[in-house]
Image (cartoon, rainbow, N blue to C red):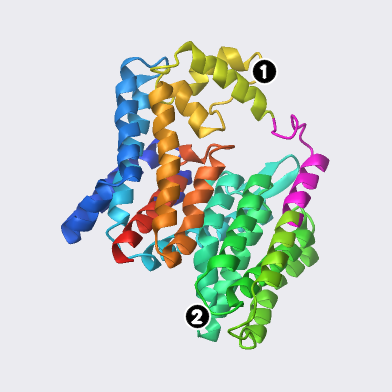
Amino acid sequence: MLAVAWRGGYTQAGRGATVILAGAALAVAWRTAPARVQRAGRSAPVLLLAGLAAFGALSAAWTVGAPADALRWALVLAALAALTAAAAALEPPRPHAAILLIVAVAAAAAGIAGAIAHADRIGLDICGSWRPAGPLEYPPALALLCVGALAPALAGALRPGRAQAAAFVVAAWLLAVTAGLSGSRLEVALAAAALAAVAAWMPAAGAAPAVACALVALGATLSALAVGGALGDDGAPALVAAGLCGPLTAGAWLAVRGRIGPRARRAPWLALVCVLGITAVAGSSADERVGGCAYAGLTHGRTGIWRAAVRTARERPLAGHGLESFLTASAAQQRRERAVPVQYAHDLPLEAWVELGVIGALLVLGLYVADARAVLRASRASAVLLGPAVLAFLAANLLDWPWHLAGCGVAWAIAVGGVLAARAYS
């Protein structure tokens, strides 16, 4: 996942590498499993992504921004379509889940280390609190990557081997802690939703998945409480206390998993996961209110951005202003709402309307529907393992901008390819 390691795929060099490697992956997949690639290529998610890429490239002819920016981002969208089709050539869901887990654990470890060491870029000082950012250099994006890998980590915790199970529980704890320390209410809520989904629907006898999720949620909550928002500033005792929660969570899981009967009910443990998730979201909200930032209301100023975006979209409702032109197109309207205009709309369908008009907005909305439908039609194992990565990415782009980080997009494309392939194997 070079796109993740290369500054999250946000730079032009990282995006260029993503395009090249996606093309190579498609060529390899075509050579090894052409029928599966063709099947995926005819699916709605891939066709809609390809449609966005094609229409975005055409918009270079009328963009109010730089035509080169429109063409470059259109290539990235085409690369995501190609990678989705290539990922569908793998037999789901284990290879896809393994990729998501390995990349997320490595990025989370780098982010936590960066925040503790106060290292710029991989750790960020946000309103007086150091947050793990990892190679993505943006804490909510790192948290989103962790959310998508929670289900694979918890699935590994259900394996027979004690050492393996303990390692996977520690990985799940690390991912949950990283999401919790991101400072993003949205990502904390998505992490809680992912844990609840695994607790409720992970294919396994009895309450084992729900118990594992509850222990991970409890361990992550205790770690977050130990360090609070001052990661790296509370001294060694707080860091040691927070770090010990990982092995203690693994030890607790090893101690109880053999005692969970096949008829044990999941409901009480699922309720505990939900309570801990609500508590974590509330704690994240409270942390924001006492932080050093002057946040503009509950939405952090997003409502003003959205009002400006709607007014901008109405100026060219049909064809839009051109791909990757949101800042240029909406700057004047944004200045009516805020002192400094932002580059992205923090709402993907609305941004698509501004940049690509009604056609672009419909393509994006269609992509949401098609991806959700693919998750629902996949096998249960694939839906639980890969569905959170697919749906969390889409949900995050209703309030944030991870769409523009090619690293996040690559992880999402691999997960979408997995759920598309699951239909062929179900």
Q: Label 2 belongs to which residue?
A: 159
Figure quadrant of residue 173: bottom right
Q: Residue at x 58, y 58 (%)?
A: 194
Q: Label 1 belongs to which residue?
A: 337
Report if residue 246 lies within the magenta region. no
Position of residue 232 measured from the top left corner of the image (x, y, whole percent): 73, 55
Q: Residue at x 68, y 53 (%)?
A: 181
First along the sequence among labels 1 and 2: 2
- Apparent side of residue 373 relative to residue 81 in the rendered image (left or right): right
Q: Badge 2: how crowded within 10 Å, few (<14), some, or many (20+)?
A: few
The residue closer to the viewer here, 265 or 393, is: 265
- Apparent side of residue 179 relative to residue 282 in the rendered image (left or right): left
Q: In what quadrant of the picture does the N terminus appear?
A: bottom left
Amino acid carrying label 2: it is Arg
The residue closer to the viewer here, 152 or 328, is: 152
- Apparent side of residue 252 relative to residue 203 in the rendered image (left or right): right
Amino acid carrying label 1: it is Glu
Position of residue 264 measured from the top left corner of the image (x, y, whole percent): 64, 81
Q: Secondary structure at mark 2?
A: loop
